[in-house]
């Protein structure tokens, strides 16, 4: 747990509490463009059950979501759409790159494919694999939860993250 | 399929040569009846194959461009026709030069050719004259060049969104 030198006891406790609340109530927005979507269905439904980690309910409006799961290859033609969806999400928000195509472009090293979505939106957690196993996605969710808990959360105003 | 080979030409090829003569050349292909067709005659021949009683090639299975870069007639357009009535296929190959790869559209014969010709234009820059709406279908409007041409640099990227300057 990172304690800011300038923060007092109460501020850090509020931050810890908000982090604890936020990490167990992730609302994913599945931005599914390709075959990784099958793996996303598996991980989000009963067999692997992301609900156990508080990240179950997919919201199909970016305005109601706080975790953007980018699942599948993003082409240059699709990139402005992804940026628009990211911009529509309210703070605080996190981004998961699901599958190797979103992490680096994967084996689509060609004219059409974005070579890693971190060139167009900021990414918090990378889950490589083609497609990643559901266990890998769950591992990624847990790592993201640790990251959220370690962040500083303010009761008012935007998340004190430098990415905007 | 293997009995319809060069040694034993099929009745369709016989009819084609009897009708069009020099404009049609039989090509040796392992997959079936294949002819190389004069570019100026291609649309006429396809229309004849479609409408001639007894042939009835009423379905355009596929239409695609090919780039044989070092070769002199650089581009090729391949039409694959199918006759639902006779369960018979034929491949037509049209060779086009590098400077002005242009060929008559077959959208008036097969509506399905619309998007196929747009794809061949998008990927190879082959112009289909008479096409009702010849614009890109896979790539975005801002894209420059034709990505499946063999002289398109394999590592050239044309992103719409400028890359992020600030990283986490």
Image (spheres, coloured by chain):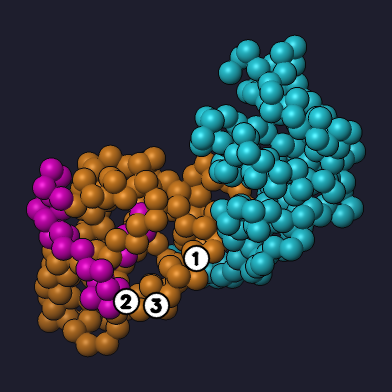
Please tell me whether residue B5 belongs to the stretch shown in magenta.
no
Where does the N terminus of chain A fall, quadrant-wise? bottom left
Callout 3 touching callout 1 (CB < 8 Å): no
- Find disc 1 in the rendering and name its residue: A79
Give coordinates of residue B48: x percent, y percent.
71, 43
Residue in the foreground of this view, choosing between B130 and A46: B130
Q: Colour of chain B?
A: cyan
Residue A135 can be seen, yes or no: yes
Q: Closer to the observer: label 3 or label 1?
A: 1
Q: CA distance from mark 1 to mark 2?
A: 16 Å
Please rate how many residues cluster around mark 1, counting C-alpha atoms within 10 Å: few if below 14, some from 14 to 19, many from 20.
Answer: many
Mark toward the viewer: 1 or 2: 1
Q: Chain of mark 1?
A: A
Element carrying mark 3:
helix
Quick check: marks 2 and 3 in contact, CB under 8 Å? Answer: yes
Reading the image, the residue beneath label 3 is A87
Please determine if labels 3 and 1 lie on a single subunit.
yes
Residue A12's place in the image compared with A43, above or below, is below
Quadrant where the C terminus of chain A lies? bottom left
First in sequence, mark 1 or 2: give its number.
Answer: 1
Q: CA distance from mark 3 to mark 1?
A: 12 Å
At x 63%, y 13%, the residue is B3
Q: Check disc 2 and report its element: helix, strand or loop.
A: loop
Q: Residues within 10 Å of mark 2 (few under 14, many from 20)?
A: some
Magenta stretch containing residue A55, yes or no? yes
Magenta span: A45-71
Q: Which residue is mark 2?
A: A89
């Amino acid at each position: 747990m990172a304690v800011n030198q300038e923060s007092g006891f109460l501020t850090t406790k509020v931050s810890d509490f908000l982090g604890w609340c936020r990490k167990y109530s992730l609302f994913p927005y599945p931005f599914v463009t390709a075959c990784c979507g099958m793996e996303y269905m598996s991980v989000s439904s009963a067999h692997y059950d992301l609900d156990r980690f508080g990240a179950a309910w997919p919201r199909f409006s970016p305005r109601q979501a706080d975790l953007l799961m980018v699942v599948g290859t993003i082409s240059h033609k699709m990139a402005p759409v992804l940026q628009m969806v990211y911009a529509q999400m309210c703070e605080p928000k996190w981004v998961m790159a699901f599958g190797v195509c979103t992490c680096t472009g994967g084996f689509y090293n060609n004219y059409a494919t974005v070579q890693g979505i971190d060139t167009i939106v900021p990414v918090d957690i990378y889950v490589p694999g083609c497609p990643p196993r559901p266990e890998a996605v769950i591992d990624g969710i847990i790592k993201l939860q640790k990251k959220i808990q370690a962040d500083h959360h303010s009761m008012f105003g935007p998340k004190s993250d430098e990415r905007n | 399929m293997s009995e319809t080979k060069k040694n034993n030409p099929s009745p369709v090829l016989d009819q084609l040569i009897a009708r069009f003569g020099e404009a049609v050349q039989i090509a040796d292909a392992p997959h079936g009846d294949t002819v190389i067709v004069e570019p100026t005659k291609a649309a006429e021949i396809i229309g004849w194959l479609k409408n001639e009683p007894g042939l009835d090639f009423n379905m355009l299975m596929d239409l695609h461009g090919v780039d044989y870069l070092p070769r002199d007639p650089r581009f090729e357009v391949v039409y694959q026709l199918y006759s639902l009535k006779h369960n018979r296929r034929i491949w037509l190959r049209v060779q086009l030069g590098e400077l002005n790869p242009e060929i008559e559209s077959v959208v008036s014969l097969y509506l399905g050719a619309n998007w196929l010709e747009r794809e061949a234009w998008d990927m190879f820059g082959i112009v289909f004259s008479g096409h009702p709406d010849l614009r890109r279908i896979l790539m975005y409007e801002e894209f420059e060049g034709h990505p499946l041409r063999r002289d398109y640099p394999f590592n050239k990227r044309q992103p719409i969104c400028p890359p992020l300057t600030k990283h986490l």
